[in-house]
Amino acid sequence: MTAGTTFLCSCEETMPLHGETVAKACRTKVRTADQLCRKELDFFKAVVAQGGDVTVACTQEAPLFSEVAEDLGHAGRLTFANVREQAGWSAEAQKAGPKTAALLAAAAEEMPPIQAVSLTSKGVALVYGRDEEAIAVARRLSATLDVTVLLTRPGEVTPPRETAFPVVKGTITAAHGHLGAFSIDVDDYALASPSSRRTYLWQVPRNGASSTSDIVIDLSGGMPLFPAHELRPGYLRADPRDAAAVERLIGEASGLVGTFDKPRFVTFTADLCAHSRNKITGCTRCLDLCPTGAITPDGDHVAIDPAVCAGCGQCAAACPTGAAAYALPPVDALLRRLRALLTTYAAAGGTGAVLLVHNGDHGQPLIDATARFGAGLAARVLPLQVNEITQAGPEFFAAALAYGAAGVAVLGRAKPKHDLLGLTRTLETTRTIAQALGYGAEVVRLIETDDPDRLAEALAVPFAGTPAPKPSTFLPMGTKRGLLELSFLELHAAAPAPVDRIALDKGAPFGKAEVDLAACTLCLACVSACPTAALSDNPDKPMLRFTESLCVQCGLCEQTCPEDAIALIPQLDFVAWQEPRRIVKEEEPFHCTGCNKAFGTKSTIERIASKLEGHWMFTGANEARREALFMCEDCRVERVVNEGFDPYAAQPRPRVRTAEDYLAEAKAGKDGLN
């Protein structure tokens, strides 16, 4: 809830204030104004000078208010909420009191600081093109950058009169890296002959050349060198036939010298990763979804290059263990803001809340346009800005419905920057679960538009569902996986028609490892492979246990089991989630006939002995060897050493008769006759 003082401004009486509703719902001291940024600025100064936390229901003049507060040495927190475009400038502004309170409460939720990754460029640039256009661009950039031109399959290109920078020939076959650390592989590489006259003459080409640079400027007109190339820092690409695009490229490239900070979008905990164990591949969800190639396999886990990561967040949304977690903001902070928004709206008397999830670059301008040129957002539509819509994982949508949202709309672009496969999978899983619990099948939807009128039309379509009759107010705390479990348990507890078990599609991050008890030998290879301890043993006796809430359906146990006794069943079993470890199988241990120490299981030892029954190694003169099968490893070694037999030694092989044997026998017979 908001604390301290909240300023509400009617923006020259263009919108209602709802001061009483805000004061009651947010438990804050409300100060009202009509033109706080101009004629009543001294009023703001007087309050700020007294100290304490201050929230201002205006973002347009945030730079002015921040400067004033800094000049006055304000020691408290200063936060801003966009009430005007999101609630006040609306055809339903008079009914937007609960929404205004909710927006202020959400804005007052403190977000953790952003961690940064530093990229350093010394201005070494590679201009990759086909003809004179690449040379012309390089000439313009040579005043600020250290440029080299690489021409791929050039035709007749006239060399410049003066060699101001190197011009070479070659075709890039592979490219890696980012701003300040690019590396390329080049085939058909050749230097220009200094005697080139009318057109470039090239020396003998060779394959397998390599080079490094800080910046790559691609004017080749061919396929991009990187996936999701527009998101790769330091890689600038333009169609050489588009003069305006080339001009923008030159302007951007000229400024890429120095040290640049980019957010660290994702935090990664390798120990939690379920990618691989014992050279067996398990979970590949993040690898399948990353649009930039920032994620690569790295032994038992994956590696995420923060310099390449563009922050889409699909890896974190899909990661079932929480190894990859979004940091802008962390999921617990985002859920706290979500909680403040929805619970405050309900506390202020609001009903039928529709959560509108959007980003700043695309969604905010559409909302502003709707407010300025249309009817504005409805009083029940609560906008929540995130860094990227694809960062929202299953726990986010589950929490939204548990907190009482009647529907969740995700606002995306008409032409997304990258594939939304991860988001669409999450929405589909949410629909399946929501329908099974009585919320309705269409309580979450994706709106893909760049038109504010289409946005208004989409939001006007009601959500055919039933909100939680008694919404949850749980406080989101803990790790990503813990919040995932908590959100779904709260979703179940608040459900209109709860059920104990929901079948899910293959690939869902929840489920059961079904064990064939007849085939299982309790070798416990699955326990050593399980990255989340969903499968566990008992150090005191042969036992296999399973904790369903920890299972992420990575498949490592299924692939590791030597008896093919495990099958994955994707499901959401709320009863199993709230139970302790279930005992899947247990047996009495077999006791060594020598020292009585427990080792293995009775069924396993008996199975081995049965399979070896009648084998020449343990029959006849070798009968005594069979006793070693029923001994522990220590007693078995002692018996072998003391009695001098090798349990793996074969019977003496019969002597093979040779030609010499037959000749000797024939000679002996002949001599006998004589």
Image (cartoon, rainbow, N blue to C red):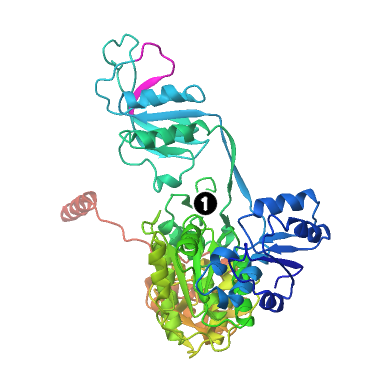
Judged left or right of residue 200, residue 434 is right
Q: Is residue 164 magenta?
A: yes
Furthest residue to the right? Answer: 50
Main structural element of the magenta stretch: helix, strand or loop?
loop
Location of residue 656 in the rendering, given as x and y in whole percent from the top left corner = 27, 56
Q: Residue at x 56, y 54 (%)?
A: 265
Say whether residue 248 is visible: yes
- Residue 562 seen anywhere in this rendered image of the structure: no
Q: 54 or 311: which is nearer to us?
A: 54
Residue toward you, 52 or 22:
22
> How many circles with numbers are drawn on the protein?
1
Q: Relative to the observer, which residue lies in front, 430 or 296?
A: 430
Left or right of 294 in this view: 106: right
Q: Secondary structure at mark 1?
A: strand
Q: Is residue 302 above or below residue 506?
A: above
The magenta segment is 160-170
Near-viewer residue (567 or 221): 221
- Residue named by callout 1: 304
Magenta span includes 637: no
Q: Residues within 10 Å of mark 1 (few under 14, many from 20)?
A: many
Look at label 1 and name its amino acid. Answer: Ile
For image coordinates 48% across by 31% down, the residue present is 213
Q: Residue 621, image x and y in percent?
A: 43, 73
Q: Residue 543 location in percent, x, y?
A: 55, 80
Q: Say which quarter of the image contains residue 565.
A: bottom left
Q: Could you tell me residue 1's position as x and y percent? A: 70, 73
